[in-house]
Image: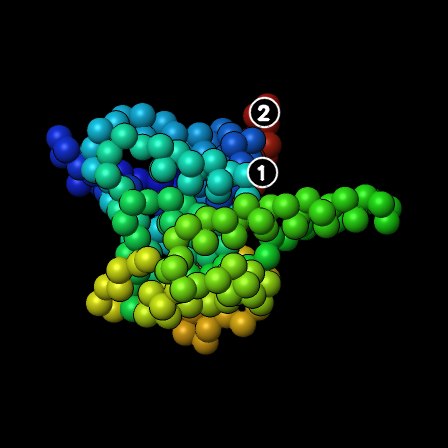
Amino acid sequence: MAIEIKNETSDCAELYLSGSIIDDDMGGIIDEWCDNSTGYQWPEKIRSQLEGLKGKALTIYINSDGGSVPAGVAMANMIERHDGRTTAIVDGWCCSIATQIFFAADVCRIPANAYLMIHKPIVWNTGGNADDLRRQADVLDTIQQGLEATYRRAAHEDVTDEDIRAMVNEETWLTGEQAAAFFHVDVLESARMAACVGSVKFMKDVPADVRLVVHKEDAAKEQQNEKKCCQKAAQVSKARAAIALALAKGATI
């Protein structure tokens, strides 16, 4: 499960929100067909978790590379509507639509060595004729206006609309201290960063230390996958040997 509740008491709880944000349809498929949904989070999952936390103060730890805009906005609105004080803390990084969830909290905190990343909304697998593409571009512009509205509400008074738009247009990475220069965030003492692997390969200007963390996680996952493949191959070989032995003895299968 990508969304975990920890340290729950009668009046408070911690919510851990880690991984890529996907819509409910995709989440339902993962829930039904996968033994482990770690690495993904979706609106229905957080809604069901929040149902049991009404009235409690929440500390929400975020470590996400972003994902689906509608899903992220829905999750942000759920956090904003929560019946209880909310504090969001960036664990490693908070990118793209995940920043909308971050700024939905009453209090926003980020370690000095963690990251926020904001950028223009993107459409993958674009298709259609020229008119379709123009309409799609118009939709993206409208979505960007909504995202920028959230950033303006979270920004200091001296940060202009033009400043916000420029940061979004250029894909801007901010450390905790840099984020505090633009937004109402509390900067925490640096801790060991734990960035989640996701769509970093499709992002521009990713800080070198973030790429290093992701590279190490990629290598570890590749090693783990190789081990699983070897185990699977061994199981298949064992099964084939058992079948061959059974056939040799004249058994029917």
**In which quadrant will I find the C terminus?**
top right
Camera sees residue 181: yes
Give residue 39's position: percent from left, percent from top.
44, 47
Give residue 57's position: percent from left, percent from top.
21, 37
Compared to 129, does 186 lie above or below?
below
**In which quadrant will I find the N terminus?**
top left
Give the SS element for disc 1.
helix
Mark 1, residues whose alpha carbon is within 10 Å: few (<14), some, or many (≥20)?
few
Camera-side residue of 164 and 218: 164
Give residue 206's position: percent from left, percent from top.
50, 70
What amino acid is at disc 2? Ile
- In the rendered image, the residue lying farthest to the left is 10
Q: Which residue is mark 2?
A: 253
**Residue beneath the point at 24% across and 39% down:** 85
Give residue 145's position: percent from left, percent from top.
58, 49
Q: Which mark is residue 244?
A: 1
